[in-house]
Amino acid sequence: MTYQATREDAGEATAVTGVVRVGDRRGRRLGFPTANIHEVSTVRRDGVYAATVALEPDEVTFVAVVSVGHRPTYYGPEGTRLLEAHLLGFKGDLYGRSVRVTLRHRIRPQRRFDTSPALVRQLQQDVNDTARWAALNNLDHLITEPPRTERSKGRWGADQRHLPRDRCRPTLRALKRTEAIAEAARHVPADADPHQWVAARTGYPVADVAWRLA
């Protein structure tokens, strides 16, 4: 089913405030780093949402793709239920920082994917769907320009103060890497260690190959 962007229904918005915790960094390996919050009892339905994330105490706000659930692709139904927010356009470290996440529109339910490449392709689609939703709701300015308050306080590194408008470039590189690894994995000889063989074939680190072939 093709996602159709719609205008926000303010009555459906749900806010979650919490402190960002260190996770297993799997999202970063896949090209979609996330801020993880464990206090999600106020969210009734698991799923993937278009959202906004305000960084406290200065209220600098970003559009984000947010997943709430048990991360079924890697942990099954017994995985810890948490909120993972991928902030579009943000670069930096949020560990230990208090944030307010407002879930504004549910894009799709959570589901399990058979492979990491399949999950990455869906995550890229979620980013695109969220960007379309933001444009429709006049929030795309939160994606295309780093907030001045963040830049003036030096929280963006010197190489991050003039970010390109194409925010998807790093994600597309990660997708291409994942697909290259998946393609090489189809040709692993029966008597070879798959991670070592694919790493040698593609030139990517063994640890990276292991994550993407999980």
Image (spheres, rainbow, N blue to C red):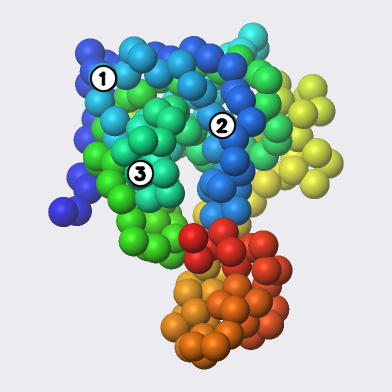
203 in relation to 109, above or below: below
Residue 112: assigned label: none
Could you tell me the amino acid type at mark 1?
Arg
Q: Mark 2 = which residue?
A: 35
Report how far apart the C-alphas of labels 3 and 2 lie in the structure: 20 Å
Q: Is tag 1's residue or tag 2's residue first in the polypeptide sequence? A: 2
117 in relation to 88, above or below: below
Q: Mark 1 = which residue?
A: 44
Q: Secondary structure at mark 1?
A: loop
Q: Secondary structure at mark 3?
A: helix
Of circles 1 and 3, the one toward us is 3
Near mark 1 (Cα within 10 A), the count class, few <14, some 14-19 or many ≥20, is few
| 34 left or right of 75 in image | right
Q: Splitting the image into 4 quarters, where does residue 209 fall?
A: bottom right
Name the spot of residue 52 as percent of width and height, x first.
45, 25
Q: Secondary structure at mark 2?
A: strand
Q: Splitting the image into 4 quarters, where does residue 97 fall?
A: top right
Q: Nearer the viewer, residue 83 or 58?
A: 83
Name the spot of residue 76 as percent of width and height, x first.
35, 44
| 125 left or right of 55 in image | left
Q: Is tag 1's residue or tag 3's residue first in the polypeptide sequence? A: 1
Name the spot of residue 57 as percent of width and height, x first.
64, 9
Q: Mark 3 = which residue?
A: 76
Name the spot of residue 139 as percent of width and height, x first.
42, 30
Q: Nearer the viewer, residue 191 or 56?
A: 191
Q: Nearer the viewer, residue 202 or 60?
A: 202
Near mark 3 (Cα within 10 A), the count class, few <14, some 14-19 or many ≥20, is few
| 84 left or right of 45 in image | right
Could you tell me the amino acid type at mark 3?
Gly
The structure residue drawn at horizontal position 70% and vertical position 68%, both measured from the top left corner, is: 205
